[in-house]
Amino acid sequence: MKILTQRYKVQHTRYRLTLGLLLMVLALPACKKYTDAKPDQKITTPSTIDDPEGMLDNYSVLNAQYPSASEVSADNYYLADADYSSLVERQRNFYLWQKTDDIGGDYTAPYNSIFYANIMLETLGKLSGSDPVKMNEIKGSALFLRGSYHYALAQLFAVPYDEQTAVTDLGIALRLRSDIADLPVRSTIAATYTAIITDLKAAVPLLPASPLLKYRPSKPAAYAMLARVYLSMRKYDQAGLYADSCLQLYHKLIDYNTVTASSTIPFKQFNDEVIYDARTSPPAALSTARARIDTMLFQSYAPNDLRKTVFFKSNANGSKAFKGNYTGLSNASLFTGCATDEVLLIRAEAAARSGNAQSALNDLNTLLITRYKTGTYVPVTTANTGQPLVLILQERRKELLYRALRWTDLRRLNKETATAQTLYRNIAGTRYTLPPGGLRYTFELDRNAVNISGLIQNP
């Protein structure tokens, strides 16, 4: 992977031995098929603060391991028969919402990153006499990473949060220690989200107030992630409060009039809207050569909406492909980090749901004026729209596609009659359906984790 900063170049060289040893440990579950072999503590426990800081700069392990299966299963795109047939069976099953326990990296990779976070936390607990500011940043970063990866796993492998059943619904296997000899058990949904929120809240006071290195967590990143978590729980007041806390610290937006719409890669990595940079590996189903943007979604953009040309390119057959990724890459990797546009939309939705239409529309207008051709955007007011929430949800769909957010939105919105919807796929003359609240909105656990650890499988 391309080195991100000069600082990273130096640290990568200094710590490559430690990181290499840890990567070998991380490979143990795969090589030994989830055996209970305990790694040598001399390998898994670095001895100075330089070691966990070096881990923190290992982008490929800590920032680039988020799962992509949710976006493969979401409704932002469709596949032609030939492109569907060219995929491996796992992704074909994700696309058609078929029951499968062949999950692979979408299950194991996030847990590898959580392993790293736990190593950092355990190492810091044994060090003394080090720079307290640096120790706080590392500890806060590790807590942020553990919380955000547990959250990403919960969006796939646990049922959607429901206040009425959270204490009995099965959540995910929480990994709060690095010892792989500890066989995991599944927590309840209530315990899962409590652990996620506890980690993220504990990270806030330890992290720097601004994202100086955007591949490292910061206070606004932790606030943004908390807003995202509470939104998924349909705790909209809390989501709005944390979104506001984030925006008080970081609120930069890109004027899309300054973006070269014809560019293959319109946005650079670490652009002005990025608060925290993270991504998935590139799923083959979402490559621009295969994935075609949902026709109705594309048609929903107004003629003067710059996203219509900045986000999409035309295929030879007239269909559209997505290119507006905030990763700065031309492949199918999804941006899963935190950005100002998402946080503004969370605050707007929370305000609309609380009855504060004017505040909601102010946030929406702040975003959209940067998305339209200069001089063409007409601000939305309470006088010219009757349902701010409907408009905000529409703009959320149009703004945040291909960020592994749509699946969670579908799951939570299916809990509300007015926004529940049925998804459809058509392949080889057969129509496949995913109804609101369907079982396939929760993925099965990876078969190896179940076979070796004895975890309770999803239906």
Image (cartoon, grey):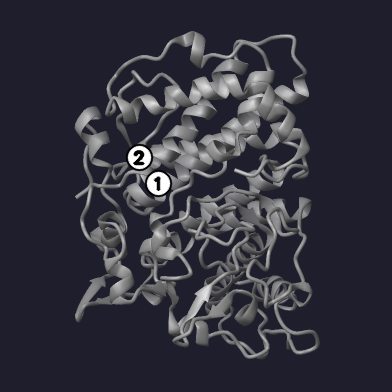
- Which element type, helix, strand or loop, lies under badge 2? strand
Crowd band around label 2 with a 10 angstrom C-alpha radius: few (<14), some (14–19), many (20+): many
Circle count = 2
Q: What's the residue at 48%, 26% (across, down)?
A: 23
Q: Mark 1 sits on what residue?
A: 154
Q: Amino acid at mark 2?
A: Ile
Q: What's the residue at 52%, 35% (across, down)?
A: 146
Rendered image quadrant of residue 312: bottom right
Q: What's the residue at 51%, 25% (across, down)?
A: 118
Instruction: Tell me the quadrant of the picture where the N terminus can be found.
Output: top right
Image x and y of residue 96, in percent: 27, 66
Q: Earlier in the sequence, mark 1 or mark 2?
A: 1
Rendered image quadrant of residue 144: top right
Image x and y of residue 18, in percent: 57, 19
Q: Is residue 266 above or below residue 339?
A: below
Q: Mark 2 sits on what residue?
A: 172
